[in-house]
Image: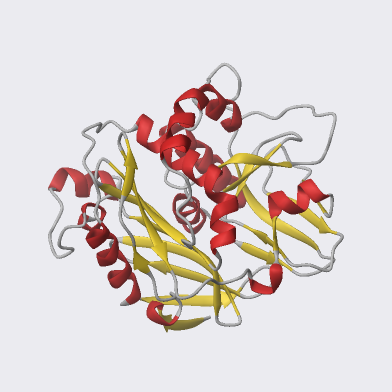
Amino acid sequence: MNTIQMKDVLPALTPGEAIGHNNLTLVPLWGEGHQRRYQEYMLASEAIDAGVMAITEASDSDVVSEVLAVTHTRRLILLINGEELLGATQNSILTSSILLPPKAEIRIPVSCIEDETYDSASPFLRSGSNIHGSGCTSRDIQHIRRMCERRDSGQKAALAIASQHDICEDSSSAADLDDGTAALWDVFELYHEALPCPADACGVVAAVAGRFIVMDVFDSPLTLHVMWPRLLSSYAKDAETATDQSGRRFTPQKAQQIITYVGEQFCQTSPALGLGQDIRLETAHVTCQGLRVKEMLLHLSIFPKPCSDLADGNSILGICPPSQRRRASGA
């Protein structure tokens, strides 16, 4: 494991003009030039649809903790942190971004997003319509894994977090995330009409009621364009279920403050599952997970800590009220 500064990981990013709908504000991020995908990789949804990758459950236990990805192409395949995998006995989400080498067969850790199992006619999983950011986030899952020595204990805790964040919307049907999204689709359509993917952007900062919820950065505008419908649905879901419906806006200046702050921090790098380096960062204000291959950042997700003033774009030198600090510490 190595320690490097995040400014050496992040590409040069320029925030654009904020766009918004209802309670959601998005600040597009532009990188230098018009980058193509690293070695023309495929995304997981593209590979599954093309029939060059199959994903099946790889665990015999009642709780799905890993899946088996088998690829049949010479092209690289990128799996994105937070992507849904639907089907088989339980739905799950990926907890890291992973770049699969050509013709690979790799077991990949996931976290289950249901508390029941099902009998399925097919063992194969498909890509879902969501990218899970600030609901059941990789930040939460990674924290659980550090706190729990056994994988199944962490899995149960992940289910508890899913329930806490209202991911399980239908208590009578084992909380299928994709079904929950379908129930809101009429509302989501309005977000998709109002917020098309910004041309040539390679990333976005999302905020709800003026509070930063996530920043996603990719190596290529094409990747953001393909991921946009699922990313936007996940952001919209947070906006629609937020208790604060004030409609406050987030500014490009606040997005730049987040970029500057993250760039000043030091992160840990380690060999990734698949190709490249896994990037991890946790401070008092943010957590990050990303993937870098040969000095190229393919994906980075940045989440605010619940008690951070950075979420509001304010000075990060303040101290949260005792009630917030108590909730954040679990006291």
Residue at (54%, 68%) from the top-left corner? 219
Residue 96 visible at all: no
Image quarter for residue 42? bottom right
Q: Quadrant of the C terminus?
A: top left
Whether 147 is drawn above or below 266: the answer is above
- Direction top: furthest residue: 172
Q: Position of residue 245 (x, y in %)?
A: 25, 31
Foreground of the two, 228 or 64? 228
Image quarter for residue 315? bottom left
Q: Position of residue 47 (x, y in %)?
A: 76, 53
Decide if residue 109 is on the left or right side of residue 231: right
Q: Position of residue 145 (x, y in %)?
A: 52, 55
Decide if residue 108 is on the left or right side of residue 247: right
Decide if residue 28 is on the left or right side of residue 185: left
Q: Position of residue 280 (x, y in %)?
A: 47, 69
Decide if residue 104 is on the left or right side of residue 258: right
Q: How many marks?
A: 0
Foreground of the two, 45 or 16? 16
Residue at (48%, 59%) from the top-left corner? 146
